[in-house]
Amino acid sequence: MLSHIQTVNSKLTTANCIHMSGNMNLTLKVWRQPNNDTKGSFVNYPAQNISPDMSFLEMLDVVNEDLVKKGEDPIHFDHDCREGICGMCSLHINGRPHGPKQAITTCQLHMRSFKDDQTITIEPWRATAFPVIKDLAVDRSAFDRIQRAGGFISVNTGGVPDANAIAIPKPVADEAFNSATCIGCGACVAACKNASAMLFVSAKVSQMALLPQGQPERYKRVQAMVAQMDEEGFGSCTNTGACEAECPKEIKITNIARMNRDFFTAKFFKQEEA
Amino acid sequence: MSKLKNTFSSSLGKKLIMALTGLFLCTFLVVHLIGNLQLFKADGGKAFNDYAYFMTHFTPIKVVSYLLYTSIIVHALYALMLTLANRKARPVSYGAYAGSANSPWTSRNMGILGTVLLVFIVVHMSNFWYEYHWGKVPFVEYRTDLTTGQTTQTELAAADFKDYVKYIDNGVEITRAKDLYATTAFAFQTWWLVALYVLGMAALSFHLIHGFSSAFQTLGWDHKKYVPLIKMIGIWGFGVLIPLAFAAMPLYFFFCI
């Protein structure tokens, strides 16, 4: 028995050794751009001794520490909560938003998803409506303006209403909740070959169109939000489904169909104007 | 009126026009295919030539045909407008873009496929539609003995009638018509024209595998029960069966006649 435990221990130690020496050396091909008015270009950086357990953003932190030590300008990128709920991190990694894995944000992407000696191309979200602030950080305030155009419910505040005072069938509540999980990261725009924001806008339209509280402004809202979406310079939808495949929260394109339905209903059958 | 203008100038309104014209063109394909199946009838082209005359001279069909030409032009123009706007939405393209990881090839190449189809339509209409109306289509006379049902046919050098006549003389039904069947049979002896038609039908197949169900998504028709049905009709009906049947026609004339 004792010998067995020893064997296990020695195996663990060996495993640890492999692990320590299993750190990766990578080449990063990073988009550097001082601001939106200046043309950008790719610059190669080595990322050495990277643990496979690091998140992608931690790996960039390591590279940036080196750059700062050398007195160079660190790579600018967006991040905040680092637990996949704020929607702040972005990055187009090897041709895909939030990297090669599905249903996660970049902060939830680990370096074990890459191979030793691999070259990783890192780019910002590319869209007219998302101007580059610096390097990999883009200005996503277009999404805020779309929300401000109609992504809300006007109610008077007051006492807390009774629970279940308004009956909502469970499947409808679930569907609304699924739509509401959109974190507004912009991966849908980044993935879309037309840089269309339809998945984001449709999720925001849907979460309220599905619920009783959203009904009074339903047809005004959809017109206002679509108008703002067009004004921001996003492209139009060609139903490729790329947004749905890349969305870290797995928002479905059924939302887009719902938004289209509400938009055409509003335009052809309702009196409400945006 | 301003509300309508505002609707069709929005990105969703333009998509609506794409979807409606696209679906209208799909319904036309079905009618066109059923009509063209007369080509396979071994009657010296009588049924096909009758059909060709009917399609070009029956007023309701003529009205729909102008609607059809308009739809083709509008569909292509709006596609161009939307594509240019979409390019503007991403002026700097990605250094690395793994489109195949998240979307089907057909959905990302509708513009290229549509352009091939537009070229095909122009060639196709100049081959047959233009020829039938203003070109040099030969004339043919069919004599059907009404008692025995036997039909004989003779080529006519010049027409002493306008487009089409049909009458019964001494128990023999005489039909004189423009012989579009002969024109078709002659055209499809050229190998490169056959190749072009087959290529056109391949483009049609890939265009509709995405296009048909995509139109319903744009219209907002999304239903757990019906979407799989729409997808099935889009892929197997419009993506496989219809283009295959159309492609069989030039191949039939090239190899079997």
Image (cartoon, coloured by chain):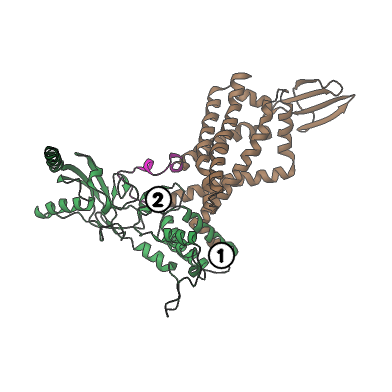
Please say whether residue B195 is one of the residues in the magenta stretch: no
The magenta-colored residue range is: B87-108
**x 51%, y 47%: residue:** B214
Chain letter for the residue marked with disc 2 in the picture: A
Label number found at residue A12: none
Is any atom of residue B134 visible in this view? no
Chain assigned green = A
Label number found at residue A243: 2
**In-image side of A88 versus B116 (left or right):** left
Q: In the rendering, at what x and y percent does residue A24 appear? A: 17, 42
Please say whether residue B94 is one of the residues in the magenta stretch: yes
**x 82%, y 26%: residue:** B174
Q: Secondary structure at mark 1?
A: helix
Q: In the rendering, at what x and y percent does residue A261 appear? A: 54, 58
Q: In the rendering, at what x and y percent does residue B166 appear? A: 82, 30
Residue A60 drawn above or below residue B173: below
Label number found at residue B3: 1
Chain letter for the residue marked with disc 1 in the picture: B
**Which color is chain B depicted in?**
brown
**Dots 2, 1 in contact, CB < 8 A:** no
Front residue of A93/B109: it is A93
Q: Amino acid at mark 2?
A: Cys
Which image quarter is the N terminus of chain A in?
top left
Whether marks 2 and 1 lie on the same chain: no
